Image (cartoon, rainbow, N blue to C red):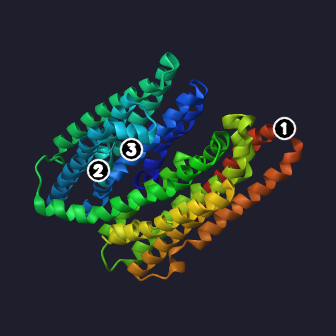
């Protein structure tokens, strides 16, 4: 079992979970330390910090390293060198195109002039600083790669908290972010220079090949990001400040749940791209195992968020924000969509144009539908419509993946494993409801039943694994 954990996606997930959990609670802590106005600036800053690299397509070459590591040793090094060159060039574009328009960007984002400079510089170093960790993971060194990223994420959280306590000034947090990621960028680049994976001169042929491979990925990432955030962008203009706060807090992002899907995909894509054409059974088993690995975490997490939505909101934000619970109960459904690794096969087979076309079609439809719904329907109904388009996008990708491989769609799903996991969660849900009358307060019920749910689930899971092996 230990060897399985070391070779699979679990090192990425386990190590990254430390930082992701800290990042989950960071805004909750900051909200109790800084004023609401400063928290608004904080959220706007990091919303656009996440968006800018997508706008400049910088993430595509970084994600493409998982494809190029499947080449021969000599070619692999050359492709990785050109990936770094392209990442750096696209990231420099953020500064070159952004600095002349700081005043306009400030008006558009509602950030002050000084914060715009921190925003642009932070966006510049964000993607290249992850080159070491991503290539390490792609090459199979999952512990080293994940540990590098996790160390800096934990450092970031600790420094943010210290700065908030000492200065209570959100701008100092932005300065700290830029400083930390500058150090990360320097160390990452230095380590990759040492390993021979960094080049500052372009090789036209390979650069062109990388660009045409990753362009659809980059564009689809941009459209997907827009589709994921369109409801918040639109509703922020239609809802009152208080109601929008309830909505955004109810759309609770739980980083470990996204990490498990990302971790599994990072391991799955190289397996699919390096498997020989005649090993179809091995490929489909890899795919089904990936779905099972994701579902082991996602399904019980959905049940937990759905069952305890009221208590989670009260615990995190106090009962002043209890109206967020209705949004959390609906938003929890979106995590079930992560069980579909919809783009792993197109990426592994080099058919990345479809990823862009898929994201573009559903992105445009989502924007039209959500914008129209926001004018006539409630915020809860807008959220439901947004989730429907997210599901359809992923399901369409799964259907296309089955056509690429010549598999039947139903044969790609590990039905028995999904049924077992769901059955266990349903049984535990019934036990939680049976136990509810024995507690005077809902929070007491939550404090007891939520950990008991998780503990009993993993006990049953461990026994089943032991029996099968």
Q: CA gap, disc 1 to disc 3?
A: 40 Å
Mark 3 nearby-residue class (10 Å; few <14, some 14–19, many ≥20): many
Report which residue position mark 2 lands on: 135
Please provide percent x and percent y for residue 81: 18, 51
Q: Position of residue 2 (x, y in %)?
A: 46, 50
Q: Is residue 9 above or below residue 96?
A: below
Q: Position of residue 219 (x, y in %)?
A: 35, 61
Instruction: Return the residue nearer the eye: 91 or 112.
Output: 112
Residue 286 visible in this rendered orientation of the protein: no
Disc nearest the viewer among 1 and 2: 1
Residue designated by label 3: 146
Q: Of callouts 1 and 2, which one flags the residue occurring earlier in the amino acid sequence?
A: 2
Residue 207 in view here: yes
Q: Secondary structure at mark 1?
A: loop
* C-alpha separation, residue under disc 2 versus residue under disc 3: 11 Å
> Is disc 2 placed on a helix, strand or loop?
helix
In the displayed structure, 428 sits above or below 310; it is below
Labels 1 and 3: the sequence-earlier one: 3
Q: Nearer the viewer, residue 196 or 359?
A: 359
As helix, strand or loop, the secondary structure at mark 3 comes to helix
Q: Residues within 10 Å of mark 1 (few under 14, many from 20)?
A: few
Identify the mark at residue 441; answer none if there is no mark.
1
């Amino acid at each position: 079992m230990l060897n399985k954990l070391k070779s699979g996606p679990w090192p990425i997930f386990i190590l990254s979970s430390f930082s992701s959990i800290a990042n989950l609670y960071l805004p909750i802590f900051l909200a109790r330390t800084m004023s609401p106005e400063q928290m608004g600036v904080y959220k706007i800053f990091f919303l656009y910090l996440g968006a800018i690299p997508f706008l400049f397509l910088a993430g595509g070459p970084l994600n493409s390293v998982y494809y190029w590591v499947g080449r021969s040793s000599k070619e692999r090094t050359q492709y990785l060198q050109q990936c770094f060159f392209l990442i750096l060039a696209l990231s420099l574009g953020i500064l070159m195109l952004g600095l002349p328009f700081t005043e306009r960007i400030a008006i558009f984002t509602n950030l002050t002039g000084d914060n715009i400079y921190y925003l642009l510089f932070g966006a510049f170093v964000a993607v290249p600083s992850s080159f070491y960790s991503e290539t390490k993971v792609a090459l199979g060194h999952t512990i080293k790669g994940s540990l590098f990223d996790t160390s800096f994420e934990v450092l970031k959280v600790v420094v943010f908290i210290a700065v908030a306590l000492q200065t209570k000034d959100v701008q100092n947090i932005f300065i700290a972010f830029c400083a930390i990621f500058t150090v990360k960028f320097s160390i990452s680049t230095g380590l990759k220079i040492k390993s021979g994976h960094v080049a500052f001169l372009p090789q036209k042929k390979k650069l062109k090949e990388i660009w045409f491979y990753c362009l659809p990925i980059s564009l689809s990432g941009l459209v997907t990001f827009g589709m994921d955030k369109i409801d918040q962008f639109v509703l922020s203009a239609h809802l009152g400040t208080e109601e929008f706060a309830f909505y955004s807090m109810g759309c609770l992002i739980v980083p470990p749940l996204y990490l498990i899907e990302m971790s599994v995909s990072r391991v799955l894509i190289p397996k699919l791209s390096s498997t020989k054409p005649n090993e179809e059974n091995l490929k489909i088993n890899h795919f089904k195992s990936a779905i099972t690995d994701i579902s082991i975490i996602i399904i019980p997490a959905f049940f937990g968020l759905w069952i305890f939505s009221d208590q989670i909101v009260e615990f995190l934000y106090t009962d002043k924000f209890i109206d967020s619970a209705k949004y959390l109960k609906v938003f929890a459904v979106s995590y079930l969509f992560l069980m579909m690794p919809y783009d792993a096969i197109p990426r592994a087979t080099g058919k990345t144009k479809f990823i862009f076309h898929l994201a573009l079609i559903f992105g445009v439809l989502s924007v039209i539908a959500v914008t129209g719904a926001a004018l006539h329907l409630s915020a809860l109904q807008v959220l439901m419509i947004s989730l429907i388009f997210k599901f359809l996008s992923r399901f369409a990708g799964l259907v296309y993946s089955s056509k690429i491989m010549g598999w039947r769609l139903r044969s790609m799903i590990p039905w028995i494993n999904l049924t077992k996991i769901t059955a266990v969660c349903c049984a535990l849900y019934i036990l939680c409801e049976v136990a509810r009358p024995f507690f005077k307060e809902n929070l007491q019920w939550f404090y007891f039943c939520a950990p008991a749910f998780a503990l009993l689930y993993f006990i049953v899971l461990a026994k089943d694994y032991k029996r099968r092996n």
